[in-house]
Image (cartoon, helix red, strand yellow):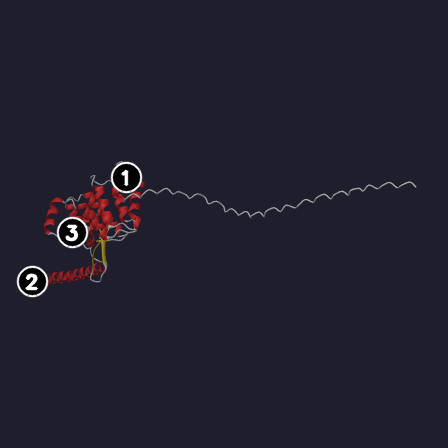
Amino acid sequence: MPSEPELIPVAEPEAEPQPVPIELPEQAPVPELEPAEPPPTIEEPSPEPLQTSEVIDDALADGKITPADAQAVVDSLMKDGEVTKAEATALIETLTDSGALTNAEESLIIDALSADGEITQNEVNNLSETLSEDGKFTTAEKELVAEALIESAEGQAVTVESITEAGITLEDLPDEQPVEVRQDENGNEVVITAEVAVALELLTSAGDIISAVFESPAELLFAIGNLGADMSVEERKEASETIIAATIVGNIATTTIATAVGGIGYRRQK
């Protein structure tokens, strides 16, 4: 018998090696970035405020004071809420150093004194003393003091006492300015104009009256025409009643005497 062929063993294919998984390292968490801060702002130093004296010097630099200059001076003086006596004095002295005050300078002084809402009697007195400390008190300076005094009265009559305190006289006031010259025994104020008050002062001196007869008769007549103006309404009424009563008595006496004399003459004729 024929022999069977030998079977050749067939090798089984080797299994392909499986890839070994590669373990990746764990990633660290990414930190959240905080927003970057803006660079600090560099503040430029503000300029130092000018001293009041420097503000005044700047205002006077060109020889004239504008409304803006005046406002700057007043604002500088009012930085602490008030204008002190020392500040007011310094302002007045600075403005008068160059000579007679201009209208703008006078207005600046009044504005400075009234910057806190009022002008006091003490401020008026200080103005007068500062202006006259050089031994000269000009008519224009007296009128400026009078203006400040009138401003301090806030629309009311000024008193003769306040006028004297301020170092001025009735003649330095405007003619039409009301003046309280006195109070009667009941406390009633007697107010007349400065012009009438000046005229009545003429009648208080016999020497002035005699001089006025020859030198200013019109002023004397004006004063005589205003006799009684410095009396209160009550005093004037009382004086009128007294005068009327005296006149009636005088008329009766005159009539009685005339009648008596006539009777005597008649009897003699008989």
Give the residue type that dot 1 points to. Asp
Visible in this render: residue 175?
no
Query: Which image quarter is the N terminus in?
Result: top right
Q: Which residue is mark 3?
A: 201
**Which of pointers 1 and 3 lies earlier in the amino acid sequence?**
1
| Quadrant position of residue 109 | top left
Q: Residue furthest right?
A: 1
Query: Which image quarter is the C terminus in?
Result: bottom left
Q: Which residue is mark 2?
A: 268
Q: Tell me if mark 1 has few (under 14), some (14-19) or many (20+) residues whose alpha carbon lies within 10 angstroms of its own.
A: some
Give the residue type that dot 3 points to. Glu
| 221 sits left or right of 19 in the view | left
- Provide the secondary structure element on which disc 2 rests: helix
Give the residue type that dot 2 points to. Arg
Question: Residue, x 26% and y 39% (percent of image)?
Answer: 60
Q: Position of residue 25 (x, y in %)?
A: 59, 47
| Quadrant position of residue 68 | top left
- Provide the secondary structure element on which disc 3 rests: helix
Name the mark on residue 58.
1
In this view, the mark in front (1 or 2): 1
3D distance between C-alphas at marks 1 and 3? 47 Å
Q: Residue furthest top?
A: 62
Q: Position of residue 204 (x, y in %)?
A: 13, 53
